[in-house]
Amino acid sequence: MSSSPTLSVVIPVYNEEMNIGKLYQRLCSALKPLNTDWEVVYVNDGSKDRSLSILQGLAESDSHVKYIDFSRNFGHQLAITAGIEHAKGEWIVIMDGDGQDPPELIPDLLDKAKEGFEVVYARRRKRDGENFLKKFTARMFYRILAKITSIEIPVDTGDFRIIHRKIQRILSKMPEQHKYIRGQISWIGFNQTFLEYDREERMGGATKFTYRKMMRFALDGISSFSTWPLKVATISGFIVSAVAFVLIIYSLYQKFFGSTEPGWTSLHISVLFLGGIQLIGIGMLGEYLGRVSDNVKNRPHYIVRDSNIADAED
């Protein structure tokens, strides 16, 4: 294999000992007929099971296999970031390690990209093995995000896609801590298109993408590419003020023409007028300021404990 392969496949791994071997076999079957140099870059994101030892065994037996081992769990998006940064290929495929993204689609993605596209993302026609609530919340999130952002982020897509090396170079210049890679790739631009596919069930094990992680991921996506929450805080402030003004009139009427307890009017007015606006506004501002604080600290995105890539631990 040459030092600069044509194709790199980046796969984040977190407690996937049941799926690594099966997915590797499917990758080999899909990539060998391409008659081109390729590599697979696995990023072990602080797995607690045997994932690392399995990856090390694959790397010893196959020179196509590269691995990066994090010092702890840094998260799915940062694992993808590390894989992209250390991929050597002219074309880079991003896919998950649970087998839901079919490696058999990679040749089609590569062929489509060579037609003149810097990005070809895989758009899901259906999602097998997921419950109604997860499908519904994902569907709603992507459509809401598309409405409130200033860039066009494709709906019904994950991170499964192929990108040209020029996209990799630009991504390396985007240092924010809270990564939302599919949004960053959309923001970069160039010629982008899609292929449709049917997403499969996990080959084994349980999903690591809990509802809590989904909420955090959604918040990263919204705060990275939209000021909509801040606008909501402003609009909510005006609405609360309007409602409060009406209730202020009512409170004054009760004071002079009705019957109230001493101090009730002033307390009622102040709570209505200030409480709602402040709580909404402070919460929204806090989310954005927290992200600014994380970026100002300028800490490394991840820490590599071990790798068979020469410059990965530098």
Image (spheres, grey):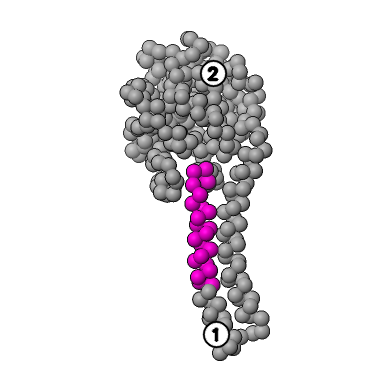
Which residue extends farthest top? 1
Q: Is residue 93 magenta?
A: no
Q: Is residue 39 above or below residue 225?
A: above
Specify whether residue 22 is in view.
no
Q: Mark 2–mark 1 contact, CB under 8 Å?
A: no
Which residue occupies 54% across, 18% down?
66
Front-most of residues 186 and 134: 186
- Disc nearest the viewer among 2 and 1: 1
Which residue does the numbered mark 2 point to in the structure image?
66
Residue 139 x/y as whole percent? 40, 46
State left or right for residue 48 relative to residue 22. right
Which residue occupies 60% across, 75% down?
269
Q: Is residue 137 above or below residue 125?
A: below
Front-most of residues 213 and 255: 255
- Disc number at residue 84? none
- To which quarter of the image does residue 67 belong? top right
Which residue occupies 58% across, 58% down?
281
Q: Give the secondary structure at mark 2.
A: strand
- To which quarter of the image does residue 47 belong? top right
Q: Callout 2, which amino acid?
A: Lys
Secondary structure mainly formed by the magenta segment: helix
Q: Is residue 266 above or below residue 33?
A: below
Residue 38 x/y as whole percent? 45, 16
Q: Give the secondary structure at mark 1.
A: helix
Category of crowding for the residue at label 2, using alpha-carbon neighbours closer than 10 angstroms: few (below 14), some (14–19), many (at least 20): many
Q: Is residue 241 magenta?
A: yes
Q: What's the magenta region?
A: 222-244
Q: Give the Cα separation between the discs numbered 2 and 1.
A: 75 Å
Q: Callout 1, which amino acid?
A: Tyr
Residue 129 x/y as whole percent? 41, 39
Specify whether residue 111 is in view.
yes
Which residue does the numbered mark 1 point to in the structure image?
253
